Amino acid sequence: MDLTAVVTGAARGIGRSVVTRLRAEGYRIVAVDVSPAVTDLAEDGRVVPIVADVTLDATPDAAIGRATAEFGRLDLLVNNAARFLRRPILDTTDDDFDALFAVNVRPTFRFTRAALPLLTETRGCIVNTASISGLIGVANQSVYAMTKGAIVQLTRQLAIEYAARGVRVNAVAPGAVDTEFMAEARAADTDPAASLAVTLSNHPIGRMSTPDEVARAIVFLASPESAGITGTILSVDGGYLAR
């Protein structure tokens, strides 16, 4: 039986790696991203790309509806779309706050709400992309950390609410990941080289994780091998939290 997934933030980085991994596992996938680059993922009808802004009210129902229209079922939702912000709180505006919650939190809530009735039917899974910033304090990430803390808590809440209905809900919490997302944020730093050195020193393995390493953790949490796991926040952080 072919399984079906919806993946947000699928055009690059972790999301793109998730689509690649799921496709290799035989999934059929609806890949959602605001970037037209998501169309590069289309292949043999097994990956259906949707160029859409996850913050728009119509997008979650449209994406979930496309999965059922194209493939007849939904087995997995990966809430991965996000923005990053590294900024002292006194320099953070109301618009910054609203924009970050609009991308990082509200779509996760709305995609999840749209998907849960179908996931209950298939006894499926949700995997959210959180962050170590949602678990510990990280300087100059107050609003970003708030959004990821919300993802962490939503994951735990839904795991409890839906366990008896057969739906497992977990999250990954990456540390620094070697993506364009991270490179763009670092380029805005006053001293990017010094910033990178601090980041690497905080990760005992001495490097950033790769998008594929995070994707493998996501696919594991969606697989039968993790059947006894729900409500877990799996850190993929190169030992950051173990220090």
Image (cartoon, rainbow, N blue to C red):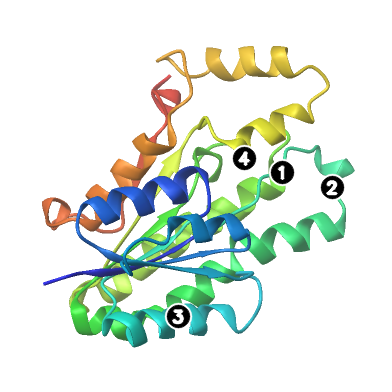
Task: Indicate left or right for 230 with 226 as reference.
Answer: right
Report how far apart the C-alphas of labels 3 and 1 lie in the structure.
Answer: 26 Å
Q: Is residue 9 visible?
A: no
Quarter-wise, where is residue 188 in the image? Answer: top right
Dot 3 amino acid type? Arg
* Disc 2 packing (10 Å; few <14; some 14–19; many ≥20): some
Give the residue pinned by disc 1.
Answer: 85
Give the residue pinned by disc 4.
Answer: 181
| For marks 1 and 2 on the same chain, the one whose residue lies earlier in the sequence | 1
Report how far apart the C-alphas of labels 2 and 4 lie in the structure.
Answer: 19 Å
What percent of the width, then of the height, locates residue 225?
Answer: 12, 51
Give the residue pinned by disc 3.
Answer: 113
* Total numbered labels placed on residues in the image: 4
Task: Tell me, yes or no, whether the two marked residues, 1 and 2, touch with CB atoms within 8 Å.
Answer: yes
Dot 4 amino acid type? Phe
| For marks 2 and 4 on the same chain, the one whose residue lies earlier in the sequence | 2
Q: Nearer the viewer, residue 154 or 30?
A: 30
